[in-house]
Image (cartoon, grey):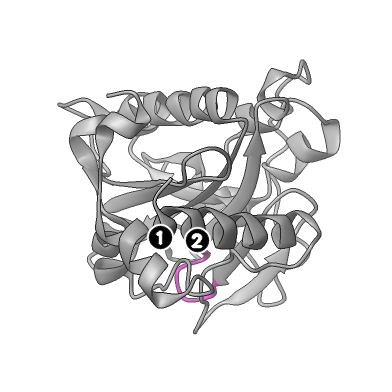
């Protein structure tokens, strides 16, 4: 293994180990949001948009192999001090309550499943998007969790050019969504996606981008705790072949 690749693997491994011990070293920046930590995921909540700037969580192969059934217990998040979106905001809006941390990722534990139905984990998604290309990407992320053993996922809506708002609380309907995956085992690698909030006309892999591209449109620094030289390598490149494509 080349020397620089060895150093990269060692440092990322240490950061991932710290996260697993409860130290949030892998969490992105949050300059204007309330940080909310649930048991199985963390989010940065935007009061203006009534949804997260990002949701971040660890996903392992064993987590996606559970048999806990979907609860559909949608409800406000009691940890949002400024008040989260309400069910009435989505009613007859034409948008789905799109999970950011998917319920299907948390079938291993009833509490984990329940947490995914907080409205702070939702964003307005076009139904054909939510049930189409977005769902297909979520399914692939679960396959990666099985194949790679452990991955770290960060996802959210892009608020810079929204479609509009819904409900009396004026919940922002993002025009695009992003998802970032960091492999925590084996060869260190990242991949990111930016998908338009509309019916997908292409494969989700056609929307693959570098993490740098997501940072440029969101203003979020995703893995700032990595040394700059290593962050540059992982965030500035994209190699679909490393992910089985």
Q: Residue at x 25, y 67 (%)?
A: 217
Which quadrant holds residue 206? Answer: top left
User: Disc number at residue 104?
Assistant: none
User: Disc number at residue 4?
Assistant: 1
Nearest to the observer: residue 139 or residue 115: 139
Residue 200 among those drawn in magenta: no
Q: Residue furthest bottom?
A: 31
Few, some or many residues within 10 Å of mark 2 (<14, 14–19, 20+): few
User: Disc 2 on helix, strand or loop?
Assistant: helix
Location of residue 205 in the rendering, given as x and y in whole percent from the top left corner: 25, 31
Nearest to the observer: residue 151 or residue 165: 151
Residue 47 among those drawn in magenta: yes
Give the answer, above or below, for where 126 lies relative to 38. Answer: above
Q: Residue at x 15, y 26 (%)?
A: 201
Q: Residue at x 24, y 61 (%)?
A: 213
Location of residue 194 in the rendering, given as x and y in whole percent from the top left corner: 27, 48
Location of residue 144 in the rendering, given as x and y in whole percent from the top left corner: 49, 28
- Residue 163: in sight, yes or no? yes
Real-space CA distance between mark 2 and mark 1, rounded to the nearest whole angstrom: 5 Å
Range of magenta residues: 46-53
Nearest to the observer: residue 94 or residue 144: 144
Which quadrant holds residue 140? Answer: top left
**Quadrant placement of the C terminus:** top left
Give the answer, above or below, for where 119 lies relative to 79. Answer: above
Q: Residue at x 48, y 64 (%)?
A: 168
Label 2 sits on residue = 7
- Residue 166: in sight, yes or no? no
Q: Are the residues tagged 2 and 1 within 8 Å (C-beta)?
A: yes
Give the answer, above or below, for where 209 lies relative to 236. Answer: above
User: Disc 1 on helix, strand or loop?
Assistant: helix
Location of residue 43 in the rendering, given as x and y in whole percent from the top left corner: 61, 62
């Amino acid at each position: 293994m080349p020397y620089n690749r060895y150093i990269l693997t060692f440092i990322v491994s240490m950061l991932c180990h710290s996260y697993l011990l409860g130290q949030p070293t892998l969490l992105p920046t949050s300059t204007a949001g309330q940080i909310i930590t649930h048991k199985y995921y963390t989010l940065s909540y935007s009061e203006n948009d009534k949804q997260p700037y990002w949701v971040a969580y660890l996903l392992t192969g064993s987590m996606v192999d559970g048999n806990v059934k979907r609860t559909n217990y949608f409800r406000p998040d009691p940890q949002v001090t400024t008040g989260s979106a309400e069910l009435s905001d989505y009613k007859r809006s034409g948008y789905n309550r799109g999970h950011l941390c998917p319920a299907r990722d948390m079938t291993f534990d009833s509490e984990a499943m329940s947490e995914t139905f907080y409205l702070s984990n939702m964003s307005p998604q076009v139904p054909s998007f939510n049930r189409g290309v977005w769902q297909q990407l979520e399914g692939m992320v679960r396959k990666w969790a099985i194949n790679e053993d452990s991955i770290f996922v960060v996802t959210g809506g892009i608020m810079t050019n929204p479609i509009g708002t819904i409900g009396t609380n004026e919940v922002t309907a993002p025009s695009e969504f992003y998802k970032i995956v960091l492999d925590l085992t084996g060869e260190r690698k990242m991949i990111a996606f930016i998908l338009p909030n509309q019916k997908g006309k292409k494969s989700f892999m056609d929307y693959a981008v570098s993490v740098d591209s997501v940072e440029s449109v969101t203003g979020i620094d995703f893995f700032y705790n990595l040394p700059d030289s290593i962050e540059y390598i992982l965030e500035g490149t994209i190699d679909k072949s490393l992910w089985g494509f």
